[in-house]
Image: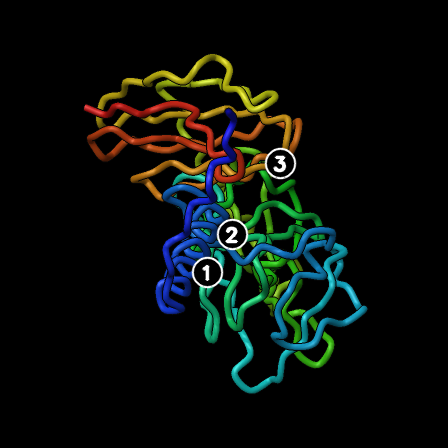
Amino acid sequence: MCRTPAPRSRPHRSPARTAALVALLLLLTGGAAAGCGGRATTHHKPGTTHEQASGDTGTLLDAQDGAGHRLREVPARGAPQVKLTARPDSEDGWNLQLAVTGFRFTPDSVGGAALTGAGHAHLELDGRKLARLYGPWYHLPAAQVPEGAHTLTVRLYADDHTAWAVAGKPVEAAVALTAGPPGQGTHSHPAPAPTGSPTAPATPAPQQTPPADRTVTIAVRDGKVLPSTGRTELKRGDRLALRVTSDRADTLHVHGYDKELALPAGQEAILVLTADRTGLFEVETHESRLVLTQLLVR
């Protein structure tokens, strides 16, 4: 004879216990959304562009900067400010310094919502973007600046890639650069012609940059390093030339030497440095985060 089993009675749960279980479930769900061991981010909402990112900081204008980024206007009082200084490097190119006030660099939050006084900078030469900057110092190689007079501009951006603006104008700074022929000197300000004489006295040409003791040629294609990442052994005092070609725009960084190099897409870029520090130093790219080589200096 078949018998229908009697339904089991469910234990009574108090409202407090039920609330605790719900809170635990929400906590676990939130942890899974942030990623195992990861951190929550403030990236823009799905279906929106960077320029439409969430956040009510300032006023998002329809106007754009020269690079096509929308302006995010804030009041002049307390607004981000930047000053640019370019000093000729003793070996190659210029060392650039960005002196900022009311602003901090936040490389870990790029792509997130616009936060007051935070973000990154763009470096432009005559209106052409050279690199994205995540800190106050940058080395600009002479190979990136054609012979002649130019205007170098830095502009401050929020994490959502909108340009900080005051009174409808981007927050930026500019300096004049004069680049000589390859192997000759460079200047951060044009030198005025002497007065009181019909012709200016001839200026001796600076000595050419000494050749490198070691040259390393590297290519980045489809997210891969060619040849495969290895070590470059050097003696202290050796001059190294890094010749890098990337299929996408990026920035090269030599750790320990604070040297950076803009990598235009599809063009070879050259960085020359003197290995005056001993140790093991990585050479990597900022955007793709690839290790190109390791410098072992003894």
Q: Is residue 111 above or below residue 240?
A: below
Dot 1: within a 10 Å radius of its alpha carbon, few (fewer than 14), some, or many (20 or more) residues? many
Relative image position of residue 131 (x, y in whole percent): 58, 46
Residue ranking furthest to the front: 1
Residue with the mark numbered 3: 249
Dot 3: within a 10 Å radius of its alpha carbon, few (fewer than 14), some, or many (20 or more) residues? some
Q: Position of residue 128 (x, y in %)?
A: 70, 48
Q: Amino acid at mark 1?
A: Phe
**Which is in the foreground here, disc 2 or disc 1?**
1
Disc nearer the start of the sequence (2/1): 1
Residue that label 1 marks: 105
Gap in Å between the C-alphas at discs 2 and 1?
A: 9 Å
Residue at 51% across / 35% down in the picture? 4
Q: In whole angstroms, how far apart are the C-alphas of marks 3 and 1?
A: 21 Å
Is 258 displayed left or right of 196 in the figure?
Answer: left
The picture places residue 191, in percent across and down from the top left corner, at 57, 60
Q: Going from the N terminus, do you reach mark 2 or mark 3 first?
A: 2
Tell me how far mark 2 sits from mark 3, CA to CA.
13 Å
